[in-house]
Structures are given as C-alpha cells and as structure tokens.
Image (spheres, helix red, strand yellow):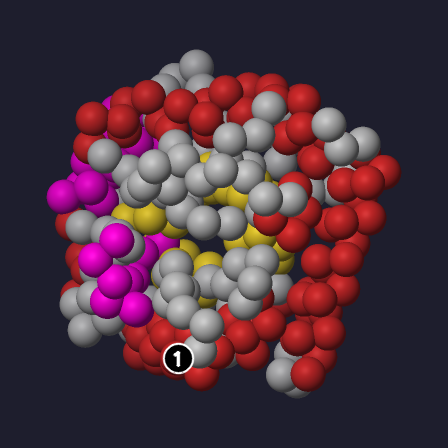
Amino acid sequence: MPTVSELRDAIAAVRARIADAASAAGRDPADVRLLLAAKTLPDDVVRAAVAAGADLLGENRVQELVRHAAAVADLAPEVHLIGHLQSNKVNALLAPERPFVTCVESVDSAAIARRLDRRCAALGRDLDVMVQVNVSGEATKSGVGPDDAPALAAEVATLPRLRLVGFMTIGLNAPDAGRVRAGYARLREVRDAVVREIPAARELSMGMSGDLELAVAEGATIVRVGTAVFGARPAPRGGTPG
C-alpha cells in the first residue's frame, strides 16, 4: 500500500503537470481541478489519497462509490460518478442514508436524466450533472454524439432537481496526439455553443494520465487521473480508464 507521503508526492507531480500545461496554454492553473479515479482501490488507499490532499474522487461503479465514499465521509471530499449509470442503480446511488455523490458526470440520455431528477425530487435534494459526449465515435465508449449533445443538454437543463454544470468525455484511444486533441477541441466547441444559453454549463471533464496536457490545452476544467498517482491497475469490465 502506498504511504500518505508517497501519494502526496504523486499528487503534487500531477498537479505540476497540470500547472505547466495550463501556463503553456495561457490559462490559470487554478481553473483546472484534479479528480482521482479510485476504481478498484482498497478503502485504505482511497482514504490515504484523501489524507494526502485529494479533494475530488471519481468512481466508475455505484457499488464502489458507495463503499469508498463511506470510508472517507469524515474527510468530506467531493465524489463524482464517472462511469456509465444504469437506471436500476439510481436508487442505490441516491439513497437517503448515503448522500455521498456530488455530481454524475455520465448522463448520456434523457431517460437517465429524468430518472435522476425523479429520485432527487423524492429525496428533496438537487444534483450536479454533466452530459457525457462520445467525441471519438468508438463503439466501446458511452455518450451521446457531439451533434446531439446540445439538445440533450437543453433537456437536462429543464429538469428542476438537476443542475447542468458541463460536459464529460473519454478521449480517443489512439497514439495520434492530433486526433486525441481534436476530440477534446470538439467537446470544447459543444460546451461553448451550449454555455451561451446555459451559462452554468462551463465544466469540461476530459483528459487522463497519458493525455491531460492535450485536454488542458483545449480547456479542460477537470482532468481524471488514476494511473499517474496509483500506478497501473486492472480496469474493471466496462470501466472508464483513469
């Protein structure tokens, strides 16, 4: 198990990469947040990461989100769901005794948005959400297509218990940096078009351990990193790479 000191050094190294990328793009490094993807990790490692300075965690699966969030509840990090959400998992994600999730980044249909809204209404709470966009067109990735994203965003924004705060994507899985960056630029274009009508929808969650510099150059406000802090881990089936 990595120590708190080791995790603190790894987090600092990633934040330095973010700061360098932001400065190179003429951006304020403070405008880019680091989300640690905690998939498959033992509770004690997640807790150590929060103790080392991580204030934003991302989880792929509802079961892991509930477990990890309970393990660090006293430390009060933000916890986002970044993996695909099935309708039958909404109640488990949003349970009265587990008010841990602060944002669902992976809303990819009007149906799941409406299901979240109904559940939040029943609980008397609001929820931040992002629309997940499949900028690469890869069949293995979830998300609405870029051309359809503005319409979905507009529909989500009408739901009274959901706060549309932005967009998320998983970058193209390819060695061609130009093509990867083009995907991130496409999401930025989607965001820029929508934010004129929905000013709160400014977040861009994009970029991971291997390509965060490309994402920051194209306007990422959240980068989702796992491997660069925790080392290589076997990805769960259907999971979002970190």
Residue 15 sits inside the magenta stretch: no
Q: How packed is label 1: few (under 14 Cα within 10 Å), some, or many (20 or more)?
A: some
161 displayed left or right of 226: left
**What SS does tag 1 mark?**
helix
**Residue under the point 51% across and 49% down:** 242
The residue range painted magenta reads: 111-140
Residue 117 sits inside the magenta stretch: yes
**Residue under the point 78% across and 54% down:** 12
**Residue under the point 40% across and 69% down:** 174
203 displayed left or right of 75: left
Q: Is residue 163 visible?
A: no
- Residue 133 sits above or below residue 61 on the image: below
Front-most of residues 3 and 187: 3
Q: Position of residue 136 (x, y in %)?
A: 30, 69
- Residue 204 sits above or below residue 108 on the image: below
Q: Is residue 4 visible?
A: yes
